Image (cartoon, helix red, strand yellow):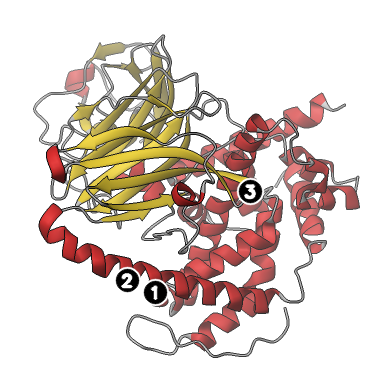
Amino acid sequence: VSGPTLDLVDSDDGTDVAGDYAALFAGQFGAMTRLATLLGADDPEDVAQEAFVRLHSRSRTLRDPHASLAYLRTTVVNLSRSRLRHLQVVRRHNEAPPAAADSAEAHAVRREDARELVAALGNLSARHREALVLRYWLDLTEAEMSDAMGVSRGTVKSHVSRALDALGLVLEGSR
Amino acid sequence: MTDLETRLRDELNAAADDVRTSPDAWQRNQALLASDRAGRRSRATWLVSAAAVVVVVVAAFTVLSGTGDDRPTPPAGSDPFEDGGLLGTPVEVARLGSGPTAVRLEMAIADGKGHRPDMCTRFVTGPDSASACGGQSDDPENALVAFDYLSGSQGATTSVQGVVDTRVSTVRAWLSDGTEIRPRLVALGVDELRGFAVPTKKGEPYAVRLAAYTSDKKGLEYVNLAARFGTDWVPTGPVSGCPAGLDCQLQNLDPGLIADVIREPDRVVVLVWPEVSEMEVSGPSAVNRNGPSDGVPSPLVRVLVITPATFGRSLDAQLTVRAFDGPNSVEKKAPLP
C-alpha cells in the first residue's frame, strides 16, 4: 500500500480520526485482503475495501484499535460469506457461470499445487472454513472467533472440531 | 496440535503470503470514501425530507443489511427499482396498516452492478418510498441453509425480511414478546425464490427469531437475529425470565432449539426456544421426558430446571439433554460437575 496522504476529518464529534484510519489501513489492508482470500471471496480486495469504508463511518469504533480490528474482521467474514451466497445465486440464475478458475482463491491454489489442505477448504461449508481460517491463520481466541463469526463460544468449538473432521474426510476422499 | 492442524497452519500462511494488494489501494479507498460521503449527504437530504412526512404518515425507514448499525443505502442514481436493474417484477410481500398511511413492503431480486444478484426491498407509503438492496446470508454451501438473504429496517416501521428457496414450505417468526407469526411467502419470479417480511410498528414487539421448515415439518434453519444484526437493533440485555446469575444475552445463545445448558452445583438449567414441544433428559440409567416448565415470565426463551428431585436420582454423572420440535431434535451434553 503506498503511503497515504490524509485530508479527512469526518466523525460525529468533529475529532480528527484521519491518522488512526490511515495507520489502520496501512497496517491491516493487506491482512484483511488475505483473510477474504482465504475465506474464498472472489473479490477479496473489494471485500477489504468495503470493510474499511464501513469502519470509516464509525468514528467511535475507530478510536479503539482493538475494536477497529475486531470490527474489520467481523465485516470481512460477513462480506465474504455474503459474496459466496451471491455467487451461488448467480450460478443458479445465469446459464454461463463465472469462471471459478479466475477467482483469487483458485489463483492462490494454483500457485502451489501442494497446498492440498487449502484447496480442500473450498469443499467445506462457509462456517467451517471461517472457523479454521480464524483459528489457524489468525490465531484468534475462542472469544475473538465468537465475536467475528457472531456465534457462541460453544458453537465456535463445535465448528472447529467438525471442520477438522470434515477436512480429514475430504483428504481421505481425494486419495 | 495434531499433524493435520500443523500442516493446515503452514499451508494457510503460505497461501496468505502469495496474496498481493493493488498498489493504488489507498487511492481507491479515498475515492470510495468520497463516494460514500456523497451518498450519505444524499441520504441525509432524503431523511430531512422524510422527517417532514413522518408527522403526517408516520413512516420513515432506515434499512439495515449488515452487522451492527451499518445502514447501507444505494447511492443516489443507483436504485434498481428506478433504474431497471431488477431480474423480476417487484411484488408486495407484506403490508402494515391500511388506507393512505399503510406501509407496503415490495421486494425483488436485482442484478446489482451487473454481476451480483441482490435482494432489494422498497417501503412505500403514499407518494414516498425508500429502497435498499443487500442482506446477510449464511453458509452458502450448507444444504441446511434456507434463508438466502436476510435484512431488516428500523424506524416508524421495524421489519425483518428475507428470501427462501424451494425447499421451504413455512417460515415461523417470533417477536420479542414471544408472539409467533407465520409470514406469507410470495414468489419473486426468479429461480423460484420467495420473499417474506415481518413488519411491525415502532414501539411494538418485533421479530427476533426465524425458523424455516420443509413441507414435512423438517426444520431447515433457525436464526437468531441478534447474531445477524447485532444488539444495536435487536433487544439488548438478558432475556426476561432468565434465572438470576445466568448469561441469557440473546446474541450469546445458540440458535438451534437448545439455547444453552448450564450446570450449577445443585441443578442443571436448560434454556430452549419457543418452538420446542418436548424435552428428554437422560443419564446413565434414567430417562425423563416432558415439556419445558410452564410459568416462566419470558415466553421467548423457556427454562427447564433439572434437580435430583425432578430427575429422580443424583446429577453427578453426565446428562444428555434432547429438545424436540416435531421431527427435529437437538442434543446437548450437560457439562460434568
- The reply to whether the C-beta atoms of the residues labelled 3 and 1 are less than 8 Å apart is no
Which residue in the structure is indicated by mark 2? B45
The percent position of residue A59, horizontal first and vertical second, equals 41, 77
- From the viewer's perspective, is B227 left or right of B49? right
The amino acid type found where label 3 is placed reads: Gly
- In the drawing, what numbered circle is on residue B41? 1
Element assignment for label 2? helix
The chain that hosts pointer 2 is B
- From the viewer's perspective, is A119 left or right of A85? right
The image quarter containing residue A152 is top left
* Residue name at image x 64 percent, y 64 percent: A32
Dot 3, crowdedness within 10 Å: few (<14), some or many (≥20)? few
The image quarter containing residue B95 is top left
Element assignment for label 3? loop
- In the drawing, what numbered circle is on residue B244? none
Give the camera-side residue of A61 and B163. B163
- In the drawing, what numbered circle is on residue B114? 3
- The reply to whether the C-beta atoms of the residues labelled 1 and 2 are less than 8 Å apart is yes
Q: Residue furthest top?
A: B216
Label 3 to label 1: alpha-carbon separation: 25 Å
Quarter of the picture holding the C terminus of chain B: top left
* Residue name at image x 53 percent, y 72 percent: B35
Of the numbered discs 3 and 2, the one sitting upstream in the chain is: 2
The amino acid type found where label 1 is placed reads: Arg
Dot 1, crowdedness within 10 Å: few (<14), some or many (≥20)? some
